[in-house]
Image (cartoon, helix red, strand yellow):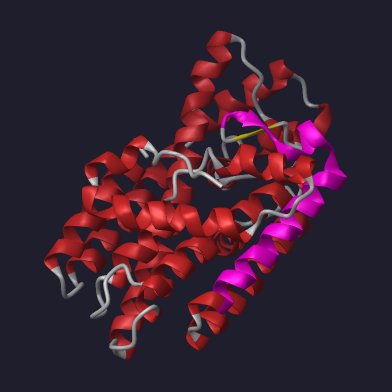
Amino acid sequence: MSTRNLPKIWETFPELSEPLQSILTEMSSSWHIGFEEIDHAIRSQLNAGKLVRPALTLIFSRLTSESYNQSAISLGASVELLHLATLIHDDIIDESKLRRGHESIQSQFGKDTAVYAGDYLLTGMFSLLERADKPAANKLALTALQEILFGELLQKQNRYNIDTTFSAYFSQIKGKTAALFKLSATFGLVSGTDYSDDLFSTVSHLGENIGITFQLLDDYLDFESTTESLALGKPIGQDIRNGIYTAPILFALDDTSVNTEIKTLLLKRDAISNEELTTLHNLITGSNAMAKLKVLLTEYSDSLKDLITSLPNTQIQEQLEHLSQLLLTRNA
């Protein structure tokens, strides 16, 4: 089966071109099930991914004596299949119609096909783990799966809960987003053999930090873009209608000058109108929520820079700084 061209982001990382193509080949050979509808459904989403997580696996493999080794290729491919499986299952739960700019699998093919597709991708992930033949990776994958499930359950528990705290939300994103970034980074390290416990701890912390920073920035920018969506008359507020309250809402709920009005609107749940969503948006942007989130983002960005600088390889530092900049400016 032929593989696709790499996303444009990797044009500025020529050294990753060949190993990323190898990862695409590994992925393509690991999930072809032979049922045309499911194969087509998976391919439609797989071809739209940016491959950030497997690229992190490759980058961190350079901290071993076996850069871009075959185990790193298999582990990078496995983490991308896991990522796609979680996206498919998320879309089923949220009844999302779009994913990666295309119609979601559950919307296009039905929830039954989406469940089968997501489940089958998980079998592909496990086959790639077996191919990598790294016992430490198996343990990391199990831990990540547990963390992802915990994050999903926290989100389910906190739906429509107007008393949800940012602390609870933070635990949620550590599972739903940061766990996969942490897995990607540590997969790179355990693809080799010559690493210390201290280095493993640093890489684990760095990977998690990337995921948290990325999610908080996504919350900030998604809410900022709502202003443009309102002006253009586009649909907004799907997360709010689904009872998923992100950082800007949770910080605004801590602002006593607006929290009563915000709670009244959130209690309307999925019956909230577009006009009421506009009012809610204005209340949040008029509160101190976005300023608080920006301060937190600055703290995490600074911490990320410090962690990258602490790595014992200047070339890897440069790669990660460049990739972080692309991610944090949404150019990835």
The correct choice, above or below, for 205 with respect to 266 in the image is below
Tell me where residue 53 sits by quadrant: bottom left
Nearer the observer, 32 or 55: 32
Task: Give the image location of residue 147, x and y in percent.
Answer: 62, 71
Q: Which region of the structure is painted magenta?
A: 101-130
Q: Is residue 108 magenta?
A: yes
Residue at the extreme top: 232
Q: Is residue 69 visible in this depiction of the protein?
A: yes
Quarter holding residue 204: bottom left
Say which of 151 and 278 sits in front. 151
Q: Nearer the viewer, residue 252 or 167?
A: 167
Residue under the point 70% across and 56% down: 155
Q: Judge from the rendering whether residue 57 lies leftward or rightward of residue 118; answer left or right.
A: left
Residue 177, given in percent of the width and then of the height, sits at 54, 57
Residue 72 placed where, x, y %?
A: 40, 70
Q: Position of residue 163 (x, y in %)?
A: 71, 53
Residue 21 belongs to magenta span: no
Q: In this orientation, which residue lies closer to the viewer: 25 or 44?
A: 25
Identify the image quadrant of the C terminus.
Answer: top left
Query: Which SS does the magenta portion mostly show?
Result: helix
Q: How many numbered marks are there?
A: 0
Side of 55 where 155 appears, left or right: right
Residue 269 in view: no
- Judged left or right of residue 147, residue 271 is right
Residue positioned most to the left: 314
